[in-house]
Image (tube, rainbow, N blue to C red):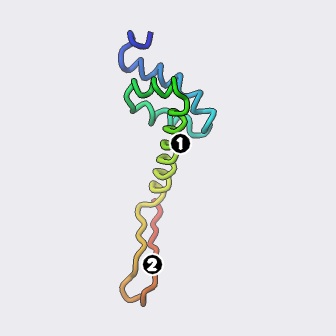
Amino acid sequence: MLAAAPPQEQKQMLGERLFPLIQRMYPDLAGKITGMLLEIDNSELLHMLEHHESLKAKVIVQSSMKLWFDICKCWQWCIIGVRAGQRGGLAVLLKEE
């Protein structure tokens, strides 16, 4: 059934199978992580569906990436460095989005 479907339908079908598995691990992030995983090649997604340890490892990586993306998105920039004229002190310049 999956092989006969057009590529976009294949992604939809894989997403529908992945989402409940991911939701058990990260209920609040399941939609976002599923979407991120659907950017991966279908053969790798099928492998992850057959080997849940592979899926779990990939989900952990994706959730970490999502966390860092959210942290970076909250700040336009962050520079930690020595300001001229501060006698060696560290200046942390943070600017909210």
Q: Mark 2 is on which residue type?
A: Ala
Q: Mark 1 is on which residue type?
A: Ile
How dense is the environment of label 1, judged by Cα within 10 Å: few (below 14), some, or many (20 and up)?
A: some
Q: Earlier in the sequence, mark 2 or mark 1?
A: 1
Q: Nearer the viewer, residue 2 or 56?
A: 56
Q: Nearer the viewer, residue 20 or 97?
A: 20
Secondary structure type for disc 2 = strand
How dense is the environment of label 2, judged by Cα within 10 Å: few (below 14), some, or many (20 and up)?
A: few
Check the picture and name the quadrant holding the C terminus: bottom left
State yes or no: discs 2 and 1 in contact (Cβ < 8 Å): no
Residue at the spot of label 2: 91
Residue at the spot of label 1: 60
Taking the spot 44% from the left edge, 36% from the top edge, the residue there is 36
Q: Relative to 92, say whether 24 is above or below.
A: above
Which marked residue is nearer to the observer: mark 2 or mark 1? 1
Q: Relative to 20, say whether 91 is above or below.
A: below
Taking the spot 41% from the left edge, 70% from the top edge, the residue there is 79
Query: Residue 22 at x, y = what percent?
Result: 57, 33
Taking the spot 60% from the left edge, 39% from the top edge, the residue there is 26
Query: Residue 95 at x, y = what percent?
Result: 45, 66
Secondary structure type for disc 1 = helix
Check the picture and name the quadrant holding the N terminus: top left
Q: Relative to 10, say whether 63 is above or below.
A: below
